[in-house]
Image (cartoon, rainbow, N blue to C red):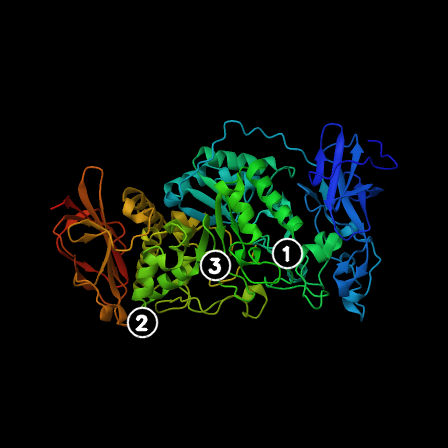
């Protein structure tokens, strides 16, 4: 390709690098730059071949057109403007900048002080100015153009009320799966391996939720300590897929093929996305893209001292989604993944940050929520928020707008505490079992808005919740000071692995009881990958930097007697959830609808089969609970689904409440392999155990 002396004018939209068959149009936003240069590199990204000024600026978008350029061209930007940290401006043309809209990257960050716009060792700190070229240490953008054929692809469009989410890491899910060819283990290609699909289907999973796969940075501190950013919550590019998870030549079609094959198997794909902050850290962090293009626009800065970043995320910076161009970038990124990769939804890390109006508090009517809800593409997808951040008023569970589901940590804590035997948990536990209507039943929201989980990537897997009372994060190199100290965990008599059969039997029973709670509560259940057969992190409850067998799913556990038994139990749970509509009701149940004479849609009893009085609810030592949900089926028959829960440390005899129905025991967490059987009016429930009883009959 001949490189001209200057670029043609081009057009300001779309942003990024766009190939039109005649050349490539480049467009990048900056409200405060004086000049922006396009830098062209050799195919390996090592040698800078030319710098060409973007000749036009329209509505604060700098743009130019390079004739005859084609996909595969390696490029970056340099931005000229004031270097005035005290005013929030940090322009430094010595620093190569990644195009925020780059669909593909070449190379990795090579840590050096030259990546900073200031002289790291200067006494003036970030008020100083660094003149070294950062290009040798920087990844570059690659012009891309996808012609992937999606014709015939059908999104599964699983109704929310039928959804079962499986949270997993794109690499960790298959890195140890021997059925996958060695060169594909831990890659996008392996996500759709027949073994993976068959397992997800057997577990009743409808939706695979992947930890971040946007291109991200390996933290300098971690690399210097011989560790790795495993989780990926440190985004470098919101449009480019992470190259480390590709088994081939770095082409995004590998991920597209995986998603298409998952769709063909009826499985949705949700991406965990991080739009609350970037990899550039605080004002003392490096310059990769946004800081060098327009620091004062992209980031929220301290109002009376814009030298400093607002840190509502705990990562050093906070993106300013109250600015229309920043919000546009986020919406464009989401739409790109929804259309070019046909993902089925998004889980928003620190979703409260996205709903903050500048430096003000959280607002469910903020621009971010409004844009997504009205968008004809995004508004039809599954949208999930992590409803907290560390900023003022940062805990907003239940306060998001209609159309959004939310991670419900109250469900997690109540479930763990009830089955641990904590005092006073019966009322709280009942609220969570009933879909957390106290939190979500407003503005025509539905039970599915509560994403119920007992474990997630951020914490311990379920096997560790019942095996370790203390965190064991020494491998993270932070003197065991990282991670949550209170996990509402119980080791049941021994810290970590034990040969004591009694302890192991109790651990397994409590595990099954928590899983039963997860799948039989109203709301959307989310299962952490590997919990269905006993994955362990050996007590580490913050494995964000452990890219090794501590974090990877050990599929050999599935072949052990305990692993086989647990996975079969989970299969039975998800099957029962499908078989009995009361377990995934589309509406909140409040016990104010009489389905048949004397029978309410939802009702509560104690182990005596008697209604709980106010004094019973307030009895802190009450650890037995019965929840019954009733419906009339298609044949006009009465169907009562009753959950018997014994959180005490001794077996209890439960009396099933009237009427007298033909009852059968469907699930017993104390006897996971027991077949369904008929039972009478009373049944013995083991300590820390839970039963599902289904009664049928005709209305009187």
* Residue identifier under label 2: 423
The x, y position of residue 289, in whole percent, is 72, 51
Give the secondary structure at mark 1.
loop
Q: Nearer the viewer, residue 155 or 352?
A: 352
Q: Could you say which quadrant of the image residue 497 lies in? A: bottom left
Any part of residue 178 in sight: no
Q: Residue at x 25, y 55 (%)?
A: 591
Q: Earlier in the sequence, mark 1 or mark 3?
A: 1
Residue 208 visible in the picture? yes
Q: Is 249 located above or below residue 210 in the figure?
A: above
Between circles 1 and 3, the one closer to the viewer is: 1
Q: Is residue 33 left or right of residue 324?
A: right
Secondary structure at numbered mark 2: loop
Coordinates of residue 649 in the picture (x, y in percent) = 26, 68
Residue at disc 3, secondary structure: loop
N-terminal label among 2 and 3: 2
| Residue that label 1 marks | 320
- The crowd level at tag 1 (other Cα within 10 Å; few <14, some 14-19, many 20+) is many
Residue pushed farthest right? Answer: 5
Q: Where is residue 398 in the image (x, y as percent from the top left)?
A: 44, 58
| Residue at (24% x, 69% y) in the render | 614
Left or right for 207, reference 614:
right
Residue 395: x and y in percent read: 49, 63
Which residue is tagged 3?
Answer: 537
Single out the mark in the foreground, 2 or 3.
Answer: 2
Q: Nearer the viewer, residue 56 or 463?
A: 56
1 or 2: mark nearer the eye: 1
Distance from Cα at disc 1 to Cα at disc 3: 36 Å
Badge 2: few (under 14), some or many (20 or more) residues near its Cα, within 10 Å? few
What's the CA distance linking mark 2 and mark 3?
Answer: 29 Å
First in sequence, mark 1 or 2: give its number: 1
């Amino acid at each position: 390709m001949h490189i001209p002396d200057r670029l043609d004018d081009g057009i300001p939209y779309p942003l990024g690098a766009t190939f039109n068959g005649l050349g490539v149009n480049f467009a990048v936003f900056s409200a405060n730059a004086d000049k922006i240069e396009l830098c062209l590199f050799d195919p390996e990204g090592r040698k800078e071949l030319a710098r060409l000024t973007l000749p036009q600026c329209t509505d604060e978008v700098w743009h130019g057109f390079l004739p005859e350029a084609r996909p595969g061209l390696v490029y970056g930007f340099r931005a000229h403007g004031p270097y005035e940290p005290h005013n929030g401006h940090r322009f430094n043309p010595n620093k190569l900048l990644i195009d925020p809209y780059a669909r593909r990257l070449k190379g990795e960050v090579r840590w050096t002080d030259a990546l900073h716009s200031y002289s790291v060792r200067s006494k003036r700190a970030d008020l100083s100015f660094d003149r070294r070229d950062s290009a040798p240490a920087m990844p570059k953008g690659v012009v891309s153009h996808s012609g992937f054929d999606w014709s015939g692809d059908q999104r599964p469009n699983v109704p929310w009320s039928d959804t079962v989410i499986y949270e997993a890491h794109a690499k960790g899910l298959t890195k140890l799966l021997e059925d996958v060819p060695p060169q594909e283990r831990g890659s996008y290609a392996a996500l759709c391996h027949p073994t993976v699909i068959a397992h997800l289907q057997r577990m009743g999973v409808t939706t695979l939720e992947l930890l971040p796969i946007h291109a991200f940075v390996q933290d300098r501190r971690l690399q210097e300590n011989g560790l790795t950013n495993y989780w990926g919550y440190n985004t470098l590019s919101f449009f480019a897929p992470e190259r480390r998870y590709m088994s081939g030549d770095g082409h995004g079609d590998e991920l597209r093929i995986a998603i298409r094959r998952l769709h063909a198997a009826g499985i949705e794909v949700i991406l965990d996305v991080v739009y609350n902050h970037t990899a550039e850290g605080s004002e003392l962090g490096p310059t990769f893209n946004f800081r060098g293009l327009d620091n004062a626009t992209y980031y929220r800065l301290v109002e009376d001292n814009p030298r400093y970043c607002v840190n509502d995320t705990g990562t050093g910076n906070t993106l300013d989604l109250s600015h229309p161009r920043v919000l546009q970038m986020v919406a464009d990124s989401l739409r790109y993944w929804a259309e070019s990769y046909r993902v089925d939804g998004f889980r928003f890390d620190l979703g409260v940050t996205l709903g903050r109006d500048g430096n003000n508090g959280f607002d469910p009517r903020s621009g971010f929520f409004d844009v997504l809800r009205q968008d004809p593409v995004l508004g039809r997808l599954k949208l999930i928020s992590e409803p907290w951040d560390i900023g003022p008023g940062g805990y907003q569970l239940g306060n998001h707008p209609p159309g959004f589901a939310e991670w419900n940590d109250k469900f997690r804590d109540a479930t763990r505490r009830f089955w641990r035997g904590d005092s006073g948990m019966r009322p709280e536990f009942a609220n969570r079992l009933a879909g957390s209507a106290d939190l979500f039943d407003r503005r025509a929201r539905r039970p599915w808005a509560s994403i119920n989980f007992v474990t997630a990537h951020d914490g311990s897997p379920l096997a560790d919740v019942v095996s370790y009372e203390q965190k064991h994060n020494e491998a993270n190199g932070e003197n065991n000071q990282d991670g949550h100290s209170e996990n509402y965990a119980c080791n049941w008599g021994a810290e970590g692995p034990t040969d004591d059969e009694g302890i192991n039997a109790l651990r397994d029973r409590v595990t099954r009881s928590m899983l039963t709670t997860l799948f039989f509560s109203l709301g959307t259940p989310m299962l952490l990958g590997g919990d269905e057969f006993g994955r362990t992190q050996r007590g580490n409850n913050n494995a964000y930097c452990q890219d090794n067998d501590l974090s990877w799913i050990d599929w050999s556990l599935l072949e052990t007697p305990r692993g086989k038994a647990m996975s079969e139990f989970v299969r039975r749970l998800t099957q029962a959830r499908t078989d009995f509509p009361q377990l995934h009701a589309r509406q909140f149940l409040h016990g104010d609808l009489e389905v048949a004479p004397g029978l309410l849609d939802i009702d509560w009893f104690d182990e005596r089969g008697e209604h709980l009085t106010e004094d019973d609810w307030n009895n802190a030592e009450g650890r037995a609970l019965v929840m019954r949900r009733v419906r009339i089926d298609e044949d006009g028959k009465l169907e009562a689904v009753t959950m018997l829960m014994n959180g005490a440390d001794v077996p209890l005899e439960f009396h099933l409440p009237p009427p007298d129905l033909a009852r059968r025991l469907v699930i017993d967490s104390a006897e996971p392999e027991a077949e369904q059987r008929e039972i009478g009016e009373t049944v013995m429930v083991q300590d820390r155990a839970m039963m599902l009883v289904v009664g049928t009959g005709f209305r009187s």
